[in-house]
Image (cartoon, rainbow, N blue to C red):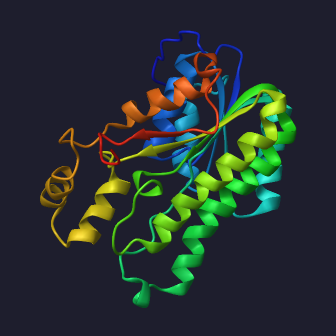
Amino acid sequence: MISIKRMGRLRGKVAVITGGEGSIGLTTARAFVAEGARVALLGLAEAELRAAARELGEDVASWSVTDVTDSGQVTSAVGRVTDRFGPLDVVFSNAGISGVIAPVTDYPEDVFDDVLAVHVRGSFLVCKHALPLMRDGGSIIITSSVVGLTSDAGICAYATAKHALVGLMRTVAKEVAPRGIRVNTIHPGPVDNDFQHSIEMAATGEPRERAAALFEAHIPLGRHATADEVARVVTFLASDESSFVTGATIAVDGGMSA
């Protein structure tokens, strides 16, 4: 187990992270635990989830194989979290898939449906079933994308899903404001991880390094983000430091959407 230095901005808080085995999800989980939270990782890859919980420390981390498009699985997963750790304070809805690169006229309908199901239905179900188990004053953070603020050719499913998350966020933010619960979306640009690099190679038809360079040419800061840089923004939104931030779209994109 890796030794994690604990600080305190999230001391005593309970957090659920979907897509918890991925680059951004796991990095954020590390940041949450370092700040004193207990975390539950939800995802599809059992071995990776189990290893992540072991790394974080089984006294402060749990895991559950959970398909976020399945209402029953989401209900059961969040219920197990509260049974073990108590009411929720933070929900990070982060599960996602990329789909394919193709023009609208050629885009596979089943892939379009799958992408919207994971991103939009998944976040809807997570909000629907987590909110009754949340303490007042909590925080929900939903991972959108820079293409939830912009778009590009060939990504109709992914961009549509990421834009839809903004509508979901703004609606939920107004519904739960009387409880002091904040709801925001984050909009990462290209992140230096396998998920992003696979998208870049599919979009450009180039090898990994060349594809990354082509994408970086469109980023004003001239580089990919690290997962840590995204996790720090999520941690800020999860903490009381963002106590008057709700209904906001937070770009973490190196200036791409400027």
Q: Is residue 74 left or right of residue 152?
A: right
Quarter the C terminus occupies? top left
Picture quarter containing residue 204? bottom left
Viewer-nearest residue: 36 or 182: 182
The image shows residue 247, relative to residue 68, as above or below, that is: above
Name the residue rendered at 55%, 64% in the picture: 161
- The spot of residue 118 in percent (x, y) is 61, 63
- The spot of residue 250 in percent (x, y) is 48, 38
Name the residue rendered at 80%, 50% in the picture: 128
- The spot of residue 12 in percent (x, y) is 71, 15
Viewer-nearest residue: 152 or 143: 152
- The spot of residue 236 in percent (x, y) is 53, 23
Q: Is residue 56 left or right of residue 68?
A: left
Q: Is residue 65 visible?
A: no
Name the residue rendered at 52%, 79% in the picture: 111
Viewer-nearest residue: 253 or 18: 253
The image shows residue 83, relative to residue 98, as above or below, that is: above
Residue furthest to the top: 7
Q: Is residue 2 left or right of residue 217?
A: right
Q: Is residue 70 visible?
A: yes
